[in-house]
Structures are given as C-alpha cells and as structure tokens.
Amino acid sequence: DFRVTDRAKLIPNGIDTRPFSEPASRMSRAELDLAEDDVVVAHAGRIAHEKNVDMLLTAFGRALERVPRLALVVIGDGPALEAMRAQASELGVSERLLFLGMLPHAELPGALAVADIYMSASVSETFGLTLLEASAAGLPVVGVRSPGVSDIVEDGVGGILTENDPREFAEAIQRIAHDRTLRERLAAGARESASRYDLEHTADVLLGHYERLAARRHARREA
C-alpha cells in the first residue's frame, strides 16, 4: 500500500505552443474547397469508438440544421473511420465533412488554422494534448464535461463544456457559431489557458520546485 505522506505538487505536461499560436504555414480554405464565410469546426485525433465519434457526428448533424454554413474538418485515422463515413452518409451531412486523414504533426498547426471552433466528444481522455493544441491555436473548444477534458478546458473561459448529450453539444456549437463576440472571447480565453501549459512555463515551475527542495536539503545538512 503506497501512500504519499508529504506535500505533493501536480505539474502538468507541457507543449510547445508557438507552432500553434504562430503556424509557419497555413492551409487555405480555397485549397480545402471551403468558403470564406463557412464556420469551420475541426476535430483531430484517433478516430475510434472510445472517442465518442458517433455522438460527435450526431451533434454536428443537429448543429448543421441551424447553421447551414457549418463545415467539419476531421484530421486523423483509426478503426472507426469507415463507420464515421457511413454515419455521415446516413445523416446526410457528407457534403459538409472533409476528411484530411493522418497528417504529420508539423502540419497540424496549419490545418487547425483554417478552423473557427474545435470539438471533441471524448470522455476517455487522461490528458488531452489535442485540446491544448487547439486552445493554443485560439480555437474555442466544445467538449464533454469529463475529468481529462475539464482539467484543460474551463467552461465559459476557453470553450463550452456540456453533458454527453448530442442535443446540448449541438446547442453549444450553434452558440459559438452564431455569436462572433462570444467566439472571440472564448478564443482569447483558450490562448490564455494554453499559455499555462507552455513548455517554458511548466519547465520553470518544475525547476523552481527542484531548487526549493535542493535548498531545503542543503539547509538541513548545515543545521
């Protein structure tokens, strides 16, 4: 039975936010056959059933009924990809979906740069790196309220969190899509939240703790 009996500090993983906040190159909407007035939603990651992609697509279909200029860009690959394509066809939303497949990580910032909103319906995240990357790119996040997501996305600050319900999830997408002021406020909040996970910041925090521990140990030896 292992127990921590001293004070503990939780230091989250860090990412290099600069490639996402300042992408070296950007995909254009024209090359993806997207219109400038489209409201583009992005989703990146492993396309698998445990990522709740069926609910995500159902919610997108509901939102599309209210926001006809909505488009979804899906980045990634996985065992549920063909099922997702089939579901899109059944829902009649295939024409508003664009599957980019698996991209090299260096190209991800440029792909996210075409989007206005990021969404993830996953409820199985431990530490959602794609949520951090999207936030660093200045994308408001629509996600499902769950431990791995709520740790990164603050509801009403960097995005909107909902229950695991396609109707509520779709309403969150609609709110951000229709309200440019809200979208801009959440985008700013997302960038600010992501900055706390920047590698330089998390490294400084870790180094500070090591320095304090070393100083405390030195003081005990001198006593």
Image (cartoon, helix red, strand yellow):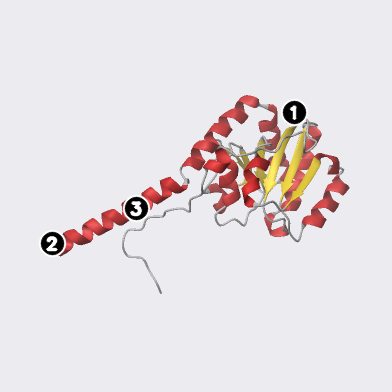
Instruction: Give the side of residue 23 with respect to residue 198, left or right.
Output: right
Question: Mark 3 falls on what kind of element?
Answer: helix
Q: Amino acid at mark 1?
A: Glu
Question: Mark 2 falls on what kind of element?
Answer: helix
Q: CA distance from mark 1 to mark 2?
A: 67 Å
Circle 1 is placed at which residue position?
A: 36
Circle 1 Cα neighbour tier, 10 Å, few/some/many (<14 / 14–19 / ≥20): few
Circle 2 is placed at which residue position?
A: 222
Residue 217 image-quadrant placement: bottom left
Q: CA distance from mark 3 to mark 2?
A: 22 Å
The N terminus is located in which quarter? bottom left
Q: Nearer the viewer, residue 159 or 218?
A: 218
Circle 3 is placed at which residue position?
A: 207
Circle 3 Cα neighbour tier, 10 Å, few/some/many (<14 / 14–19 / ≥20): few
Q: Amino acid at mark 3?
A: Leu
N-terminal of the two: label 1 or label 2? 1
In percent of width and height, residue 130 lies at 60, 49
The C terminus is located in which quarter? bottom left
Residue 63: tell me if it is visible.
Answer: no
How many marks can you see?
3
